[in-house]
Amino acid sequence: MNCDAARRRLLAAERPDRPTDELRRHLAACPECRVWGRRLVLAEQQIPLLPVPASSAKDAFVRRFRLAGGRAGGPVVRRVPLPWPTPAKERGLRKLSLAVAIAAVLTVFTLGLWSWRPQEATPHPASVPTWVANIRKDREQILALATPRERVEKLSDLAADLQEKARAMTRDGDAENLTSLAALYGEVVSGDLMEHARGLSAAERRVVLGKVVDRLRGAESTFSRLASEHPGASTARPLHDLAFAARDGGRRIRAMMREA
Amino acid sequence: MASPGEPSDPPAEEERLIRAAQKGDRPAFAALVERYWDRLYRWLHHLTRDRHTAEDLTQEAFLKAFAGLDRFRAGTNFAAWLFRIAHNNFANQHRAARKREPLPDDLAAKGRDPLEEAQDREALADLARALGRLPADYRAPLLLRAEQGLSFREIAEVLDLTEETARWRVFKARQKLLSLLAARQEQEKP
């Protein structure tokens, strides 16, 4: 066996660290191929040692997945298109639905074209990152929950998840996504949470809102600290916005508790 | 090397969890998420080189897996099935992203090297850089082989390839990886 053939066999082997007897004989006699083979094996063995930033999303995902238990269409699980083949009957139904949908779109398009008048060009909507779309879907599902108490508790969880995401983005210096997140956080905390907290009875306010205030206080402290650690960084502004939203939210919730 | 279908717990326990999850037991599926999240996320991070994208894709893969769990045949390779769902998501996302802009290369290009404390950080950083320069079509099967310990047959199943194509891609990935590492060593010579 020559060196070229030996190396090709090593490259094609499922386990280059366990060469066949024939290969082993060649490696024993050829120091260059031995070094080359060792490099290959070492590179593969080191791949699992390569660093990957820790994922902070697992715990939140598992928690929310468990919390959604029992309720069909809960806040986490969404029906999504499946990436594998479906039975023929189902495919047929899907084709039929697709045909109906296409016909409807064509009808609307024709009517639109017929009634079209030149107007100012509107800007093409910017593509939304997947994580933003996911948060928005979660938020919509939370807002569809039956009682104000459920909505407030789940919105508070969502705000906590956003807080974790913000920490990770700050660590990565990802100012662009952090700015989008600050806007979302403002919508959730200053908008939704306040609106649905007002729907709580006096007794519920006393039970539920204490925890919400504590979380917002913690969030404000976290965001302020992160902003002060890197005052000149591009992440400082969205962090200040986040801290403001948490502080303002906490203040308004405390006022509601006093009313109760 | 351990097969992905044989983590620390016995396969029978995994099968029990899958069967329970198929009956709608959310805590059972959550246990499967706990078991596979890190491995799936790690693989996707190597493919996307972006933490948030990898997390989104991991979450999406689990949601799709849960939604389609009734189609999974208990007793077959759950890891391969899950990784296949994740790869389909990645491929869709990658196709869309490629039309917009190149993927970020945080590990190689931004100098954020978490290996600062490791003795062989330079070698690992070179490896990370070289791995990042492999085309995704080669990187994905190599990672499944080297990190997840999948056989060529299982890699083929995950990536929807023939076994020979899977072997060929791993072959090319290794060849390219070694050539990139060798070129790097040449550059460093005084």
Image: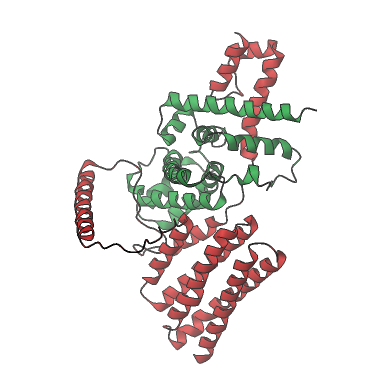
Chain colours: A red, B green
Q: Position of residue B60 (x, y in %)?
A: 44, 51
The answer to whether residue A65 of the structure is visible from this angle is no
The answer to whether residue B144 of the structure is visible from this angle is yes
Q: Position of residue B161 (x, y in %)?
A: 41, 30
Is A159 or B129 nearer to us in this picture? B129
Is A238 or B149 nearer to us in this picture? A238
Is A38 or A118 nearer to us in this picture? A118
Which residue is located at x 38 percent, y 48 percent? B19
Q: Is residue A221 above or below residue A57?
A: below
Q: Position of residue B74 (x, y in %)?
A: 37, 42
Report the quarter where the N terminus of chain A lies: top right
- Furthest residue toward bottom: A259
Q: Is residue A154 above or below residue A101?
A: below
Which residue is located at x 53 percent, y 64 percent? A181
Total labels drawn: 0
Q: Position of residue B119 (x, y in %)?
A: 76, 40
A126 relative to B142 in the view: left or right: left
Q: Is residue A219 above or below residue B76?
A: below
Which residue is located at x 54 percent, y 53 percent? B52
Q: Quadrant of residue A23?
A: top right
- Furthest residue toward right: B190
Is B30 or B170 nearer to us in this picture? B170
A20 relative to B117 in the view: left or right: left
A173 relative to A133 in the view: left or right: right
Q: Is residue B182 above or below residue A34?
A: below
